[in-house]
Amino acid sequence: MCRFRSDGGRSSMHAADPDEEGSTRNLGTRKRKRSRPGRRSATASLTGYCSSLIVLSASVLSHLLASGGLHVAAAGANPYASGCLRAKLGSERRVRVCNSDDASAERNKNGTSTHNTSEGRCAMPEFDYPEIRIAPGNWESSIFQSFIMQIALSEILGVPCSIESGSRDVLLSFYDESNAFPYPNRAYGWDDLKTANAAPRGDCTYVLDQVEDATCAHILPEVWAGQRTAWTEARTEGFIEPPEGTVTVGKLSWYLPRFVVAQDPSLATYLGLRGEENRRRLAETFLRPTTWLDYCNEVSETNCVVPDEVAQRAPTLAEIEEGTSNKYRLEGAYTGYFRKTPQNDCSNSTACTGHIVDAPCTWSTNVNQQLYWNDIHLESNGPLEPNNGHTYGDMLDIWEASVETRSPVMMWWWYPDATVQKYEGTPGEFHPIVLPDPTEECRDSRIGSDERCSDDVWVRRGNEEGKCDEEAHSMKRIIASSVGEETFKANAAERSPGYQTIQNIAIDNLNLETMLGAWVKNGYDAREAVCGWVAANLDKVMDFVPRGHPRSLVVKSWYGSEAGLLYAAMAIGAIAIVLVVLSSWTVYKYRTKRIIRNSQVDFLFLVLFGCLLVGVAGIIYTLEPGRGTCTAKEFLIMLGFTFVMVPLLVKIEAILWIQRAGKRMKRVKLRRSQLYELVAVFVVIVLCYLIAWAVVDPPKREEFLTLPDVAGTKVVKSVQCASNSAVWKLVEYLWEFLLIIIATLLSYQARHVRQEFNESELLYRLCYVQFFLLVLRAMIFFLQQAGYIAPTVEAGVTSLFLSFSSISALGLYFGPKFYLLKHGDDAAKRIVTRLGSNVSCWESVHAPTGLGGRRSSNFSDHSAARSVYSSTEEQEEPQTTTRDNGDIQNVHRSTARSSSIQSNQSNSHSSHRRKQTSLARLQDVWSKTYDRASSRNNGSRKRLVTTQGVSQRMIGTFLGEGSNRAVVEKKENVTNKVISSIAEKGQEEKGAAAEQERDDSNGTPAAHTDLAI
């Protein structure tokens, strides 16, 4: 039941029913669900005095009209609706932030708050802090502490904070415009904490939006020791943190008015209450309180038609329906009455008892256990089952009626509380009753929350060890587990100070008593009492604020302090694009040159296209993030690196395939379209991934906060491109890393490929540089994600690395080719010598020519050793099939292999005659090979002559005489190995010729490859 106090035209709800199951609210009032035992129902009562009501109908109607139908007077406007500190300390204080309970608050589709702030009552939060929701108990000290938390969070720290009343129809907020002061409809919101802990990200506002009648809270600000069992179970279930003690000390006791103790001091201790000898005295002293309706029906001789000293009138129909008629006292209408009932009559019953006012079973009351085991013959006869307790409002009314009528009463109550403050120094001052001293064993033997509300009276009585008095104890503050977990998931710049502030708030008894006393003196204006204390003790409140708070937000322009870095990165990106265009023009211009043709012109253009995409991505990185740019740069980066690396990988793998097939004496049928299809497969895979990324979790513009100084109060807000999950970006880095690793492995395998097509050293160096830049890009990305660097710095540095990736690919892969095209044979030799590799692109440039325009075969020994594969000028070089070149290539391979065999086998001692025979055999092989090749292609003769001359010089050198016996033996050994190798090749050529003849006879053309391999 709720009681309204009229405060000069402003009403506030003074009490609330803590019974969670048997109560409902209608404008803050409670309707009774049952009639009290032994009492006539309201219908029977109306029948009994129907005639009286008819007589007084005119007066009742007059009263209803005068009172406006018993509607409570409208509360005055809340002077603190826009903020306590703003109202007390001046308009320079900022307006408090909005919360989900504000009348103008709405929720949009993506779950973020939007508020109509046109009237200036609240402002949108600068920071996206999650809202904290507090569930106070239905008593003043708990509500006052909730108000202090709400002021500190909403006005000092900018954290949205709301208060849970236990009902969606009742608004409890310090900033409520109606200035109402309703009490929550339950003592402890354990289920509210469980709901908050289970909510996504611990967000109560999400639950309140999705579930119509849901209640949710993160904090229980004041929990008494009687809830030990409840918080132990909650800890076991894992939805709360370990309870934290506050500096507020509370004490639960039985109390008597001071005037009662003055009349009989023995009643102030359990020694004067217990035993059968005190039964009658208790029954005759502590009578049963009577409601207004019961008094008019059962006690008043005129059914309150005629006013008396107790009741000025009878309850009206509206008061009966609303439940006001069941009040134990009503200002101006009913003073209260205590009467002797059959339970107090010891003459007719040996089980007579006196009356004690007990609280609802949901509170921390152990009255049943203490009464029974201390043998004190008192019992409560309130309306609340199962312990027959009274509501909070009933308890206040009974005490006030006791003081006003000087009727003895005994009541379970607590300290600190405003009611205790109110009666201090008056005859109604609360005087505690002494019970047996508390012990640890007694504390652990008290009944728990479930036992208090058991229907079995013996369960409620517990055991004898729990009969002692309640000890004074520190209040506990209960916090849902999700609050701390979600707080520390955020980075330092975005982390809400609400959790630490709630932990730090500590209001001791003296401060709490000051507020409670001011509340009573100021006509029960709770907001004035709390706000006055906060304004007067602002320095103390600021001590609750964590270090580095409150923070201010500094919005950083994209082209702010890092503008130089971004513009420089943009310029280098433009240079990279220009270099790509120039390289493309050069490749196209010299596409007929053998050094370009052997590298596959089409594949070179694919690589250049990839470099172009990477360069464009570098420029886009320097632009201010937007939805289009955020998505575009991710597409460009992944596709760019795919076009750079995949064509090279496909080409090298094709060369290795041909080489492996040649070793197995297999024919190779390779179409150019096959290679393009393979490149297309990789590109399609990357495109599918990028499309999925753009659809499922697209990169978008996102505000990002950084904290330059950990202990500072300034937070810098900038923008960046980000998806909800960083896994997408991680996959991008892994894809690039995979391409680099594969390229490195293939370049290692291709290190023995013919020099004319060998790019292993170039690819190796390219992979090394790309890997280094990839690692740097990944490091910058993760440092920015951790908040160590600003998004603009990350964008500028990443843009530089992307541009360097494009430029390095041009320099390392295309640079040597372009250099050789310009500087010719001498430069090629220097490059080969410097790199120490098998790169032989220089072979295709013009070799020295003799008289008459014919190529001279009179090379020096050094040139012959370097130029085993030198060729004629490209203008004179006809296009030949792979089969036509096979004979010449076999000779080339035989000659090259002869030099590598000579260091792997043991030396043999042969005679001069055997050397001459071997030389003749070698000359015979050369002649047959020359004739066979010349019969197919006369243009091949020039190369064969050149190569034959080189080989003869090499063999002649190896056969030369020397004074050193070891040198002679080595030359003889090498000669034998050369002869053996060439003989083996001759046999292979014979088999290949026979196979060709069979193909020709069957009409099958020789296999061609589209590659120049």
Image (cartoon, grey):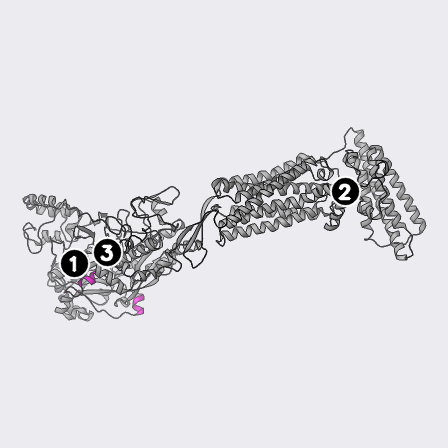
For disc 1, the marked residue is 398
Cα separation, mark 1 vs mark 3, equals 27 Å
For disc 3, the marked residue is 528
Q: Which amino acid type is marked by label 2? A: Glu
Q: Which amino acid type is marked by label 1? A: Ile
In this picture, which residue range is highlighted in magenta?
Answer: 416-444
Sequence-wise first label, 3 or 2: 3
Residue 486 position, x and y percent, is 41, 53
Observer-side mark, 1 or 2, equals 2
Residue situated in front as seen by the camera: 316 or 450: 316
Residue 702 part of the magenta segment: no
Residue 191 position, x and y percent, is 33, 53
Sequence-wise first label, 1 or 2: 1
Residue 439 part of the magenta segment: yes
Crowd tier of the residue under label 3, counting other residues whose Cα lies within 10 Å: few below 14, some 14–19, many 20 or above: some
Say if 881 sits above or below 226 in the image. above
Element marked by disc 1: helix
Tell me, for residue 843, which label it has, or none: 2
Q: Can residue 362 be seen in this view?
A: no
| Residue furthest out toward the front | 564
Q: Which amino acid type is marked by label 3? A: Glu
Element marked by disc 2: helix
Element marked by disc 3: helix
In the image, 1006: left or right of 361?
A: right
Say if 429 sits above or below 974 in the image. below
